[in-house]
Image (spheres, helix red, strand yellow):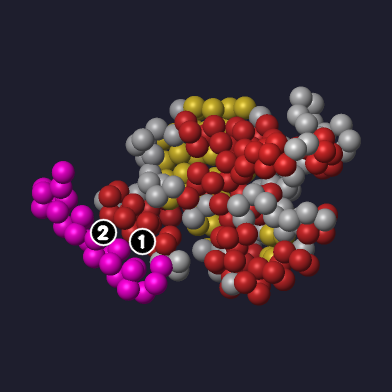
């Protein structure tokens, strides 16, 4: 069932699994503010029954990043150009970037597990969209690159925190500043990719993973994800406290004693 199909984004739902598909292969799924709004709308449109969201893309590339039209004086039709934004107030510039970021933030909700299926190029905003997901299954032809710094910009679509968490500060800095490509084999080795498979097997590998992700009881998965997301930011003893509290909730629920 398709719940959304607009501006290069299609959302379909099959019981507990939703699929968000980038649908502009002719432009290598280049991104725009309209696409970002559609992605944010997709997140708001998910039924409460959904447990896993798969992010995939049509064509040879996952996403070539921000559409270069954004850097022209005219920008996108009906949208303020980047030059116009730069000339606006601090408040307008901040709120506009915050609106763009909404497309990249809902993927880490504790009640969902999100999986990016990445083939071909995932550049800039495309890289950050893959990083927005909890897990990444990668075709062996995948290439990640963070090109913002080479354009005089910074990665600002919520990608810096997950990148540094996955590969460490020094590696993240080197990847961002050099703008070099990280190929599939290296992506798996340094922790960017959970699994690398031949391109022809990408859909099957994602399907197998999705089946495994929906197998455990949902409440236990939600509690586990919440624990792991905060594990590195909490002191050791605080994490132990959180584990005890979560387990107490699970035991009471299993015993039929929860509120």
Q: Quadrant of the C terminus?
A: top left
Q: Which residue in the rendered view is the most extreme toward the right? A: 73
Marker count (numbered) = 2
Is residue 251 shown in magenta?
yes
Which residue is found at the position 33% from the left and 69% from the top?
238
Residue 107 has which mark? none
Mark 1 is surrounded, within 10 Å at the Cα level, by few (under 14), some (14 to 19) or many (20 or more) other residues, namely some
Residue nearer the viewer, 116 or 83: 83
Tell me residue 242's x, y (percent). Answer: 30, 63
Which residue is found at the position 47% from the left and 50% from the top?
108
Tell me residue 228's x, y (percent). Answer: 40, 63
Is residue 176 shown in magenta?
no
Image marks 1 and 2: residues in contact by CB distance under 8 Å: yes
Prevalent SS, magenta region:
helix
Q: Is residue 120 visible?
A: no
**Cα–Cα span, label 1 and label 2:** 8 Å
Residue 246 has which mark? 2
Q: Secondary structure at mark 1?
A: helix
Q: Is residue 117 visible?
A: yes
Tell me residue 248's x, y (percent). Answer: 19, 59
* Residue bearing mark 1: 227
Residue nearer the viewer, 228 or 15: 228
Q: Is residue 189 above or below residue 252?
A: below
Which residue is found at the position 82% from the left and 35% from the top?
84
Magenta part of the chain: 234-259
Which residue is found at the position 87% from the left and 31% from the top?
74
Q: Secondary structure at mark 2?
A: helix
Q: Is residue 99 above or below residue 114?
A: above
Tell me residue 217's x, y (percent). Answer: 26, 51
């Amino acid at each position: 069932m398709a719940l959304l199909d607009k501006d290069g984004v299609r959302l379909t739902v099959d019981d507990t699994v939703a699929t968000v598909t980038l649908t502009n292969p002719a432009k290598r799924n280049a991104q725009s503010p309209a696409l970002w709004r559609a992605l944010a709308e997709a997140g708001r449109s998910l039924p409460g029954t959904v447990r896993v969201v798969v992010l995939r893309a049509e064509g040879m590339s996952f996403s070539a990043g921000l559409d270069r039209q954004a850097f022209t004086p005219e920008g996108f039709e009906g949208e303020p150009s980047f030059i116009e934004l730069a000339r606006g107030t601090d408040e307008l510039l901040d709120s506009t970037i915050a609106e763009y970021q909404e497309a990249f933030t809902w993927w880490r909700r504790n009640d969902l597990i999100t999986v990016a299926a990445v083939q071909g190029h995932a550049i800039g905003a495309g890289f950050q969209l893959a990083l927005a997901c909890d897990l990444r299954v990668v075709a062996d032809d995948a290439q990640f690159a963070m090109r913002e710094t080479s354009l005089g910009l910074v990665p600002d679509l919520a990608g810096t925190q997950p990148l540094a968490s996955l590969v460490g500060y020094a590696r993240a800095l080197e990847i961002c500043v050099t703008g070099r490509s990280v190929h599939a084999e290296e992506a798996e080795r340094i922790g960017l990719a959970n699994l690398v498979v031949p391109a022809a097997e990408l859909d099957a590998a994602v399907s197998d993973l999705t089946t495994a992700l929906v197998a455990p009881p949902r409440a236990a998965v939600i509690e586990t994800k919440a624990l792991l997301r905060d594990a590195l930011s909490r002191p050791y003893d605080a994490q132990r406290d959180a584990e005890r509290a979560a387990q107490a909730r699970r035991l009471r629920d299993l015993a039929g004693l929860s509120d």
